[in-house]
Amino acid sequence: MSMKRIKILHLSDLHFPLPLQSGKVDDKEGVLGPEDYEGHCNVKVFEEYLLRLAKEVDTEKCILVTGDLTDKGKVDGLNQAASFLKSAADILGIPYGNIIVAPGNHDIQRAELSAPQWQPFKAATTDFCTPFNPTNVFEIKNHLIILPLNSCQLHIDKSPIKRFFLKDAEKITLTEIAKISEDQFLSMAETLSLSKAPIRIAALHHHIVPIWGVEAKKFDPILNAGKFVRELQKRGFSLIVHGHKHGRGVKYFQDMELTSHPVGFYVISANWFGDKIGWFNEIDITFKTATLPQIIYKGYFLEGGSVKEVKDSIDCSPKILVETEKQAIDFALEI
């Protein structure tokens, strides 16, 4: 395997449409248009960062977004986000197929339990790699594969207490849950059986492990997180990336019982790009002959007219439970 370098820009929780800088906006009459919005983070500074990144030679580049392109299902927000991402791709000089998007809970339409609930998201992201498009996997052959997954589902709320207090016209109410569907597990197995990529990344919106503090909100991490984590380790995943909690973090996990699949994986969460500061991650992957690739994580934010690094970089390279270096190399070549 010849040397190759890949850079992934990981953004999450864009929450378009851009809010007015004057603070909270009460626009019940819907009189404001795109020309009234000035932006939350300094997009121009981010574009300058993209211009510098575009000059890096011999580097494959892609943009990975882990959900919440918009806020509360706003169609204009979805369109603004899609336009922003396409502009970023144009600056980097990459095709729109190099934009990978996992949908978030704010990207769904909550009006009904039917196909239209995802229609605006699908329409805005038709040129991207998403779970809903024919191109639902991003792959650089023999190097990298990224699977965007949909962790957002709507169900009828059957709570007898809630339904008792509702009017007849409101009896059917929807509740939001976070879960990876069984058909996505099956699709994952089929896709990976055809791939020789040593670096495998799963992208979803919701988190799978606690981020910080005390969590009392129902259905916050995905409901089948245990199954999801085990399946990913069994299939040799190196990274899981997500958003949702508007918090940045890196964790390492390894199920010691899975001795036939000794690779652990890192879980990387992104802070929200939609903040007035504008947070994002950079994942740098370098491949070398006959060794496992090196993966370096860095966190950035936009402040004071410049791009600033959050802290020192973190090495997220695959770790293998083997006794010798030769075993590690043999395992790397096998996958």
Image: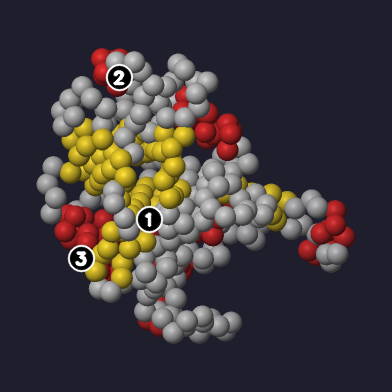
Q: Disc 1 residue type?
A: Leu
Question: Mark 2 or mark 3, which is nearer the start of the sequence?
Answer: 3
* Label 3 – label 2 distance at C-alpha: 40 Å
**Image coords of residue 195 (percent x, y):** 35, 26
Question: Which numbered disc, 3 or 2, marks the residue closer to the eye?
Answer: 2
Front one among 214 and 98: 214
The quadrant in which residue 51 appears is bottom left
Q: Disc 3 residue type?
A: Glu
* Label 1 – label 2 distance at C-alpha: 32 Å
Give me the residue at 34% from left, 31% from top: 318
Residue 11's tag is 1
Residue 328's tag is 2
Instruction: Give the image's coloring scheme.
Output: secondary structure
- Image quarter (top left, top right, bottom left or bottom right) of the C terminus: top left
Question: Mark 2 or mark 1, which is nearer the start of the sequence?
Answer: 1
Give me the residue at 36% from left, 24% from top: 320
For label 2, count other residues whose C-alpha is less than 10 Å away and answer few (under 14), some (14-19) or many (20+). Answer: some
Residue 48's tag is 3
Report the side of 174 relative to 78 (left or right): right
* Label 1 – label 3 distance at C-alpha: 16 Å
